[in-house]
Image (cartoon, rainbow, N blue to C red):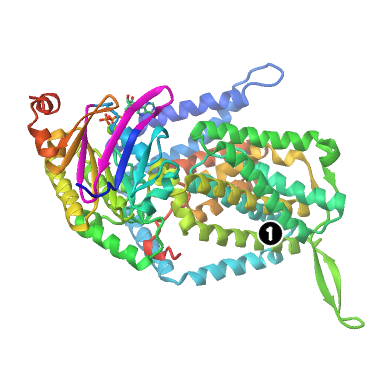
Amino acid sequence: MIQEFKKIWKQYAITMLWLLGLLWPLLGIHPDGTLSFKQTVNVWSYIFAGTFICFIFYIINKSGNFEFFTKPVVNTSQKLGDIVQAMPSWIWKSALLIGAIIYPILTGRYPTDVVINVLLYICLGLGLYVVVGLAGMLDLGHIAFYGVGAYTYAILNVQYGIGFWVCFPLAGLTACIAGCIVGYPTLRMRGDYLAIVTLGFGEIVRIILNNWMSLTNGPNGILGVKTIGILRPVMENGLTFEIFWVKKLEYFYYFALALAILTIIAVTRINFSRIGRALEAIREDETAAELMGVNTFYYKLLAYAMGAVFAGFAGALFAARMKFVSPESFTFLESVMVLSMVVLGGMSSIPGIILGVIALIVLPEVFRELESYRMLVFGLTMIIMMLFRPSGLIAAKRKKMMETKS
Amino acid sequence: MSAQPILELKNVHSGYGSIKALKDVSLKIYPGEVVAIIGANGAGKSTTLMTICGIVPLEKGDIFYNGASVKNIAPEKLPPLGLCQVPEGRRIFPRLTVEENLILGAFYRNDKPEIQRDIEHVYSLFPVLGERNRQKGGTLSGGEQQMLAIGRALMTKPKVLLLDEPSLGLAPIIIHQIFDIIADINRNQGTTILLVEQNANLALQAATRGYVLETGQITLEDKASSLLHNPEIRKAYLGE
Ligand SMILES: Nc1ncnc2c1ncn2[C@@H]1O[C@H](COP(=O)(O)OP(=O)(O)OP(=O)(O)O)[C@@H](O)[C@H]1O
Ligand SMILES: [Mg+2]
């Protein structure tokens, strides 16, 4: 035990000092120019006390004094894992689905709203996964396609009175065209350059939305976007149909859920298809992929277009829910957020990315209580997650060859 | 050698912008041959292979495969025609498994049962790949990676296989093993082989004919055995 302690106490001490150094500028420097130390030391001592207990437990655990307790726990959890693995996947899939369906009934308006957000971001994250995770092209402007989709619906609806179901595929189409427009000139670039160009593209789209007053109403945004309308049969005086506007949040939730499920299915199919294989080869070594007969130009463009389409669909739904769009919603920070979800999710596993989305949207809501420490705790959680799960929350399982039906 | 060459380079010039790496290179490779190109570092050997595959753009001259010009054919169209390269430094897909690497070699094909048979064939040539079929390519040893690179190229069912320095960085015993298999591929499958090597001794022993490339130009062409006994070659490339 002493040995274990000797090994790491220095690291621990340095970490705590480093934390103190980080905390002070955050808490000790006040806007009016005065400096204080008391609050910093206070907060720090709480953290110190907390981590010190963890530290002690860590050492005891390392030196094996907890084995009487941890061994059976690990064993049972392994057994449980085996049982879950052995279960046919439709059981837990349908359990999840049922859970998702009854969720808005069980909870209130606010939790439903948060989960709608999660569902839309799942579409964004999985779209970006095709570009970043599969094809390995760093895209820092993905939110632009979301914006293009949202504005397509908003403009067509408010200015021309076209309904959601016509605009929805059009939103996908315009986003796809936008994807090809960025994709085409950037296909010869790699790594850093590509990141800068996509970042620029995202900003260009936002600035166009902001400045093209006659079309987009500039920074004021477009108000009065109609929600989704569906035809509902009515049995009064014979069978007629009336338009039913999806106004209630719970009903809207189901549309978002449907889109997210469709996206998950589509991206899973892509992942395990010939296209997915080609994109992975391009990510690994573009020249080698070309030598093996992969049309790298075509597949890279396809990756961009597909990623954009999912974002465009989600954008249309976003506009229908908010009934309002403005350039504010499509800033660079949002792109970074989506990218963080993909990275946190492990870049290459679909369940991981879904978990990443949930973490990045739900955690800030949970930490809302902590007010000004919210972002600090959030950042800390991120760091801890990356420390303990460097390859993402759920690392990708390598696909088995014969599962890849084509 | 009266038959039509399966691969022919006619006065090929190519390079990287202002760097002219190949100046007027002409080669003829006949069906069933093993041809070696030997030359020092930077002579333009890899550039020759990359130009044949369309990765490095051709500036002047023409390349014929099976009698037809492939000058304007995109690189990814060549494996379906039966022309495939094992590039220098292996360039396998490191984060894909051995099996996935092999499947990518068969990218243009969609004859599933046949692909499965060919994978088994590669495993029979290189049993170690079969044992490690679920391991990621990047975690293989250098020799295993070279085997995987060759196996991956075999999955394209090549009629002409271009090999760039298959002996690079490998222990003599592994080199022997790999060259045995190259000879086997040539003999049993009738695959024509164009072999690029710095190790002239090795290459000329494996080859039927050889070319010597010096700073982007062919300076000598002869039967491999004659090159092997050519005093100048022995002096320049075999360290005597
Ligand atoms: N991507 C590149 N950009 C610019 N110049 C290059 C590039 N690749 C190769 N060259 C140059 O082209 C010439 C020929 O290079 P090449 O790689 O074909 O040589 P090589 O014969 O294969 O050498 P080695 O035996 O070391 O592999 C060299 O002078 C090299 O510096
Ligand atoms: Mg070379």
Secondary structure of the residue carrying numbered label 1: helix
Residue B65 shown left or right of residue A249 in the figure: left
Give A286 or B216, whichever is nearer the viewer.
Answer: B216
Residue at 38% across, 61% down: A400
Q: Quadrant of ligand 2?
A: top left
Quick one: which residue is furthest to the bottom in this view?
Answer: A238
Q: Is residue A229 visible?
A: yes
User: Quadrant of the rendered structure where residue A169 is?
Assistant: bottom right
Residue A205 shown left or right of residue B183 in the figure: right
**Label 1 packing within 10 angstroms: few (<14), some (14-19), many (20+):** many
Ligand 1 closer than 8 Å to the CB at disc 1? no
In the rendered image, the vertical position of residue B64 relative to residue B110, given as above or below: above
- Part of the protein shown in magenta: B12-40
Residue B153 shown left or right of residue B198 in the figure: right
Q: Position of residue A193 (x, y in %)?
A: 53, 31
Residue matched to label 1: A256
Q: Chain of mark 1?
A: A
Give A22 or A141, whichever is nearer the viewer.
Answer: A141
Residue at 11% across, 40% down: B205
In the rendered image, the vertical position of residue B45 relative to residue A58, given as above or below: above
Give A283 or B66, whichever is nearer the viewer.
Answer: B66
